[in-house]
Image (spheres, grey):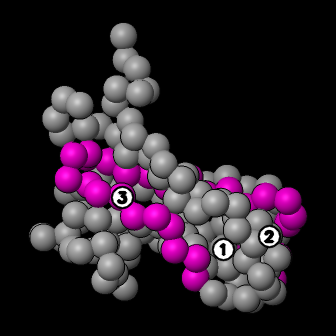
Amino acid sequence: MHKFEENCLESVAICAAATYRTATEVDGTYVDMAKYNNYVAIIEAAGATQYLGDLTCVIAESTDHSTWSNTYLATVTIASATTNAIDTVEIRAEEMSDGYRYARVEVTPATGTGNMISAVNVQFNPRFNR
């Protein structure tokens, strides 16, 4: 029987965070891809309509979990005028650059957006038995 707990590792990426009506990037907690083949960030924009522009969600990579690349591995956009949206952005470990093993979600709202956002990290398809 396939069990979520045996094959997936979940963690909080971004606790419910207000976007404070600025276009400031909100960085998620990083994950170590050394033991997993896949990573997905589940992003929720809740409580209001996404307005005055799009919510941009990307996955960045790093060699040391402190210096992050600005060449993103994946991007998803939650469009303006979307209400109570949930979307995902995901990668496979093989898409990461050589020498890179850390990934994180970064969310940037449009200026004027007042939504609450949150994100969950899920790593799955382990490379080795846990």
| 10 is higher (above) or lower (below) than 63 | above
Q: Earlier in the sequence, mark 2 or mark 1?
A: 1
Which label belongs to residue 31?
Answer: 3
Which label belongs to residue 105?
Answer: none
Which region of the structure is painted magenta? 25-54
Would residue 13 appear left or right of 32 to someone viewing this image?
right
For the question of whether residue 88 can be seen, the reply is: no
Which label belongs to residue 55?
Answer: 1
| 2 is higher (above) or lower (below) than 105 | above
Q: Amino acid at mark 2?
A: Asn
Looking at the rendering, in which quadrant would you find the N terminus? top left
Would residue 69 appear left or right of 83 to someone viewing this image?
left
Q: Amino acid at mark 1?
A: Leu
Horizontal and vertical percent for residue 100? Answer: 20, 69
Q: Are marks 1 and 3 in contact (CB under 8 Å)?
A: no
Q: Which residue is mark 2?
A: 115
Residue in front for this viewpoint, 65 or 25: 65
Q: In the image, what residue occupies the spot 42% across and 55% down? A: 90
